[in-house]
Structures are given as structure tokens and as C-alpha cells.
Image (cartoon, rainbow, N blue to C red):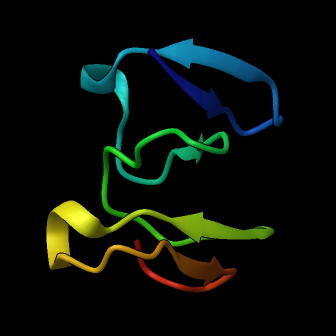
Amino acid sequence: MYHFFDLIQEEMTLSIAEIKHGDLVLVRPGKKIVVDGIVVQCNSFVDESMLNGEPIPLEKRATVYV
């Protein structure tokens, strides 16, 4: 289950099949990013090792594609 914010910023929990284009998805620290998207707020580090082999998590900031 993934955390999602609707248009009035109310947090809801949805399955991956229920996430649509334009949804805001909350990714908590240590969790996997299961959809493509853009970071819209805050910054954190993302483990991309299964995609690019890089063993060190990479920093992601607002406006960056993930």
C-alpha cells in the first residue's frame, strides 16, 4: 500500500494499481519508489543500485525526475 494525497491534501492509502497520472505519492525514508515521477517537495537520498549498480544512494531534490 502506498500513501497518496488527493487535491485537498488529505492523506489516503492506495494500492499501486489505484495510482493515476497526476497523483502526489508520499515516499517515506527507506521505502521504494514504485512509479516514475518528479520530486515536488523536500529532498532525500534514493538507492538506485538495482537500476545503475551505484552502491551509494543518490540525493534527490525538488524538480528532479525519479
- Give the farthest residue toward the front: 55
Q: Where is residue 22 drawn, in percent x and y? A: 47, 54
Which residue shows up at 59% across the image and 79% down it? 60
Instruction: Please report the residue visible at 36 percent of the width from the left and 51 percent of the height from the top.
Output: 21
Location of the N terminus by quadrant is: top left
- In the rendered structure, the answer to whether residue 52 lies left or right of residue 45 reads left
Answer left or right for 26 relative to 17: right
User: Residue visible at 37% across and 32% down?
Assistant: 19
Q: Nearer the viewer, residue 21 or 43?
A: 43
Q: Position of residue 59 (x, y in %)?
A: 60, 81
- The residue shown at (66%, 45%) is 29
Q: Is residue 6 above or below residue 59?
A: above
Image quarter hosting the C terminus = bottom left
Q: Is residue 20 above or below residue 17?
A: below
60 or 65, which is in the foreground?
A: 60
Q: Residue 36 in the image: state x and y as whole percent.
A: 31, 61
Looking at the image, residue 61 sits to the left or right of residue 36; the answer is right
Compared with 32, 56 (above or below) is below
